[in-house]
Image (cartoon, helix red, strand yellow):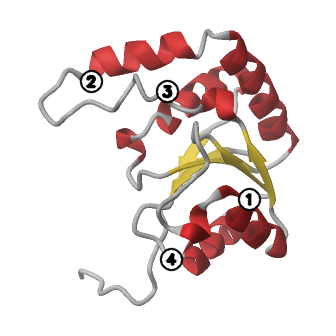
């Protein structure tokens, strides 16, 4: 059964990021960053699109699902509900609604994966986007974590 997946690249090596996508059967990487740029050049739009294409994964940028700068994630002690409410209002904008429709089609057509920076989906707007898409499509959501095969493991 298809599922909607999410992933963050924070702290990940590109090879491990792509390996995680492939292991999960992802066919389309949906970049939900408002601005698809990164301080790490391999995760900037052009380089990332090229790298995932070489791995047989298509790349789509849906700017309308990006988190506007005015809706910054809450600080550690700030109320998360106000952040959530602001982003959910953003999802009612014409650009977001159009991109939600496109993302829903991609999700229904196969194994799409929403991508943003934050490793932990609870710290990222992509989890709110995924919740909304799950309601639209009826698909389950799986949050992927990139695993570094060289990192020590706790037993």
Q: How many marks?
A: 4
Q: Secondary structure at mark 3?
A: loop
Q: Calculate the distance from the C-alpha at mark 3 to the C-alpha at mark 4.
A: 26 Å
Q: Nearer the viewer, residue 48 or 121?
A: 48
Q: Which residue is mark 1?
A: 26
Q: Calculate the distance from the C-alpha at mark 2 to the C-alpha at mark 1.
A: 30 Å
Contact, CB < 8 Å: mark 3 with mark 4? no
Whether residue 1 appears in this view of the structure is no
Mark 1 nearby-residue class (10 Å; few <14, some 14–19, many ≥20):
many
Compared to residue 9, the image places residue 1 above or below, namely above
Tell me: 15 left or right of 148. Answer: right
Q: Position of residue 9 (x, y in %)?
A: 50, 61
Q: Which residue is mark 4?
A: 13
Compared to residue 78, the image places residue 15 above or below, namely below
Q: Tell me which label, 3 or 2, sits earlier in the chain.
A: 3
- Between circles 2 and 1, the one closer to the viewer is 2
Q: Residue at x 42, y 40 (%)?
A: 124
Contact, CB < 8 Å: mark 2 with mark 4? no
Considering every residue shown, the one lying at the far bottom of the view is 150
Q: Secondary structure at mark 1?
A: loop
Mark 3 nearby-residue class (10 Å; few <14, some 14–19, many ≥20):
some
**Mark drawn on residue 80:** 2
Q: Position of residue 79 (x, y in %)?
A: 20, 20
Contact, CB < 8 Å: mark 2 with mark 1? no
Q: Tell me which label, 2 or 1, sits earlier in the chain.
A: 1
Q: Calculate the distance from the C-alpha at mark 3 to the C-alpha at mark 2.
A: 16 Å
Contact, CB < 8 Å: mark 3 with mark 2? no
Q: Residue at x 82, y 39 (%)?
A: 106
Whether residue 146 appears in this view of the structure is yes
- Between circles 3 and 2, the one closer to the viewer is 3
Q: Nearer the viewer, residue 49 or 82?
A: 49
Q: Which residue is mark 3?
A: 68
């Amino acid at each position: 059964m298809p599922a909607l997946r999410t992933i963050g690249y924070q702290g990940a090596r590109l090879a491990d990021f792509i390996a995680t996508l492939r292991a999960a059967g992802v066919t389309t990487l949906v970049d939900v960053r408002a601005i698809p740029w990164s301080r790490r050049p391999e995760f900037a739009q052009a380089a990332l699109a090229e790298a995932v294409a070489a791995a047989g994964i298509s790349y789509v940028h849906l700017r309308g699902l990006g988190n506007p700068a005015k809706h910054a994630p809450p600080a550690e002690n700030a109320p998360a509900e106000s952040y959530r409410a602001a982003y959910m209002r953003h999802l009612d904008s014409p650009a977001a609604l159009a991109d939600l429709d496109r993302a829903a089609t991609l999700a229904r057509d196969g194994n799409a994966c929403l991508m943003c920076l934050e490793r932990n989906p609870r710290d990222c707007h992509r989890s709110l986007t995924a919740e909304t898409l799950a309601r639209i499509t009826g698909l389950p959501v799986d949050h992927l974590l990139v695993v570094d095969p060289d990192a020590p493991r706790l037993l």
